[in-house]
Image: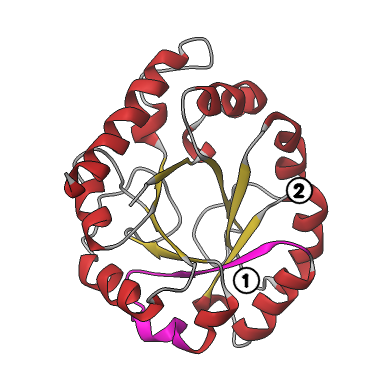
Amino acid sequence: MPVLIAPSILAADFAAFGEECRAVEGAGADWIHVDVMDGHFVPNLTFGPATVKAIRPHVRGLLDVHLMIAPVDPFVTAFAEAGADILTAHVEAGPHIHRTLQTIRDAGMRPGVALNPGTPVEAVAPVIDLVDLVCVMTVNPGFGGQRFLDVSPKIAALRAMIGDRPIHIEVDGGIDASTAPGAARAGADVLVAGSAVFRGGSARMPEVYAANITAIRQAAEGVWT
């Protein structure tokens, strides 16, 4: 199946987000991924709606916003107004994930649900028909550059659960050319990569980004050849 590459701007140059988004899209990125952390649900503090609004004019394609925050509901409208296309909330972030996903859809965005490495795939079964994307974490959320945790059985179980529904399986954490094949083989079709995309390049050297994206894509799609 086609594999989409979603570079995480958490690994980009914070002083040049607009240039970085344009450069990485020009280098072949399919989506732009924004990791939002609140210092509460996860032990780090990153971006908010203002960052999404600032980069929106520089992103031609889909803006994929991953909320690692709790609570989620009070911020849905702000992210919608900022220009997010997909808004993903963690199933562990609160007791009312059903209502959260409905709120995201009602705000005009595509809802996603995320699972931490220690959360079983069965946790999303009750809301699987409410989402356009399930994000499977292969690191414990909070920091970029962590070691990849192999959760291939979880991805495969999720692919079986989804069946023929038009729902993306996104894998986030530790993705590079060595880990992408296993994720794709298990059933993932969207790969979030931060340092593996941005390492060695810059907005002024986008050819490095292009080479990095191509290496990940070819490694992932190579499992089908």
* Quarter of image, res 162: bottom left
Q: Tell me where the magenta segment starts and ends, as one range.
A: 108-125
At 26% from the left and 44% from the top, the residue drawn is 220
Pair 2/1: label in front: 2
**Spot occupied by residue 133 in the image (x, y as percentages of width and height):** 51, 65
Q: Secondary structure at mark 1?
A: loop
User: Against 56, is 201 above or below?
Assistant: above
Rendered image: mark on residue 201: none
Question: Which residue corresponds to mark 2?
Answer: 83
- Amino acid type, residue under disc 1 in the picture: Ala
User: Against 97, is 191 above or below?
Assistant: above
- Determine if the magenta segment contains residue 111: yes
* Quarter of image, res 32: top right
**Spot occupied by residue 90 in the image (x, y as percentages of width and height):** 53, 71
Cβ atoms under marks 2 and 1 closer than 8 Å: no
Specify few, some or many for label 2: CA neighbours under 10 Å numbering under 14, 14-19, or 20 or more: many
Left/right of residue 197 with respect to residue 89 in the rendered view: left
User: Outermost residue, top direction?
Assistant: 204
Question: Which residue corresponds to mark 1?
Answer: 70
Left/right of residue 165 with respect to residue 20 in the rendered view: left
Residue situated in front as seen by the camera: 168 or 13: 168
> Disc 2 to disc 1, how far (Cα)?
20 Å
* Quarter of image, res 196: top left
At 49% from the left and 59% from the top, the residue drawn is 43
- Determine if the magenta segment contains residue 117: yes
User: Against 35, is 93 above or below?
Assistant: below
Left/right of residue 17 with respect to residue 5 in the rendered view: right
Q: How is the image coloured?
A: secondary structure
- Amino acid type, residue under disc 2 in the picture: Gly
Residue situated in front as seen by the camera: 52 or 15: 52
**Spot occupied by residue 36 in the image (x, y as percentages of width and height):** 60, 53
Specify few, some or many for label 1: CA neighbours under 10 Å numbering under 14, 14-19, or 20 or more: some
